[in-house]
Image (tube, rainbow, N blue to C red):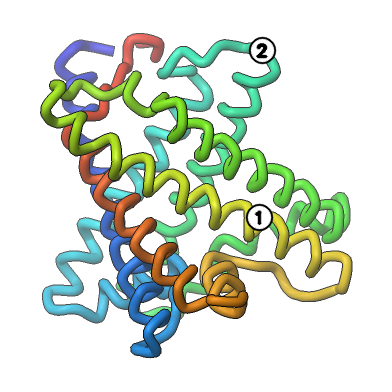
Amino acid sequence: MRSDIKAWFGSLARAGYAARGMIYAVIGFFAALAAIGGGEAMGSRDALGTLLDSAGGSVLAALLVAGLVFYAVWRFIQAVFDADGHGTDAKALAIRAGLLASAVTYATLASYTLSLMQGGDGGEGGGDWAQMLSGIVGARAVSFMLALVLAGAGIAHIVKAVRERYARNMDADAAAMRIIHPVAKTGLIARGGIFMVLAFLLVTRSVSGGDQAGTRDALEFVQGLPFGWLLLSLTGAGLIAFAVYSFALARYRRVDMNRVPV
């Protein structure tokens, strides 16, 4: 892959981080608003619908589709070609599997957004591949596998925040990092917490024969806990911090394409 193409793709991958940031900014804002009784918590698809209904929604939708596709491709490259140099031991393979799952998730969101742009309702979207897998190995087995992946991702986010591992792949000076550190830690811990709640909901709903769970379900679960308004407020603020962290990645993330074969 020529150096000019690598540089070009780096810009596209950063656009993907910005698209992710926009989605989480909406999710976090409405979670904080729901905490004080001003609205309802949202998942990723709800957030996309809100963005599309805003002023200039058609232009924004096109940018979002492009950004989500770029981000999905970047995640695929991270997973398959090990762009960040995780390695091939058990821990590294687990991380790369999570990156591959992220690629599928964001590709699905891109497809969902495109469907909304064309006047559809988004269809089943991300449920298709999960339903296909459920037909092969069983719905309960799939739920437990997804719960395990989400729990692992949640723990990884929290460890990444505490140990400041996110800084390894950021080309930012000391002054910028002093601002990024608290934002990144807050955002990663909040998102990690959501993943842990989702893992719990998947397991409990699988046992009881209930439906699958998404981000909105996790936020509503948090809201239903004792002092739920406070917990949801903090979670919403944390997800807004994750959005800001995503924007920081769009600016400072190192996108290394050297491991990708020409």
Mark 2 secondary-structure assignment: loop
Where is residue 195? Give x, y as percent.
58, 53
Mark 1 secondary-structure assignment: helix
Q: Earlier in the sequence, mark 1 or mark 2?
A: 2
Between circles 1 and 2, the one closer to the viewer is: 2
- Horizontal side of residue 188 vs 237, given as left or right: right
- Horizontal side of residue 20 vs 225, given as left or right: left
Q: CA distance from mark 1 to mark 2?
A: 27 Å
Residue beneath the point at 38% across and 40% down: 185
Does any portion of residue 114 appear in the rendered image? no
Residue beneath the point at 29% across and 13% down: 1
Where is residue 2? Give x, y as percent.
22, 11
Where 9 sits versus 247, above or below?
above
Does any portion of residue 45 appear in the rendered image? yes
Q: Label 1 crowding class (10 Å Cα cut-off): few <14, some 14-19, many 20+?
A: few
Amino acid type, label 1: Trp
Name the residue that disc number 2 marks: 89
The reply to whether discs 1 and 2 touch (Cβ–Cβ < 8 Å) is no
Residue beneath the point at 21% across and 39% down: 248
Where 33 sits versus 172, above or below?
below
The disc label shown at residue 129, or none? 1
User: Which is more toward the observer, 198 or 134?
Assistant: 198
- Horizontal side of residue 100 vs 73, given as left or right: right
Q: How many marks?
A: 2
- Horizontal side of residue 116 vs 76, given as left or right: left
User: Which is more toward the observer, 87 or 10?
Assistant: 87
User: Which is more toward the observer, 249 or 137?
Assistant: 249
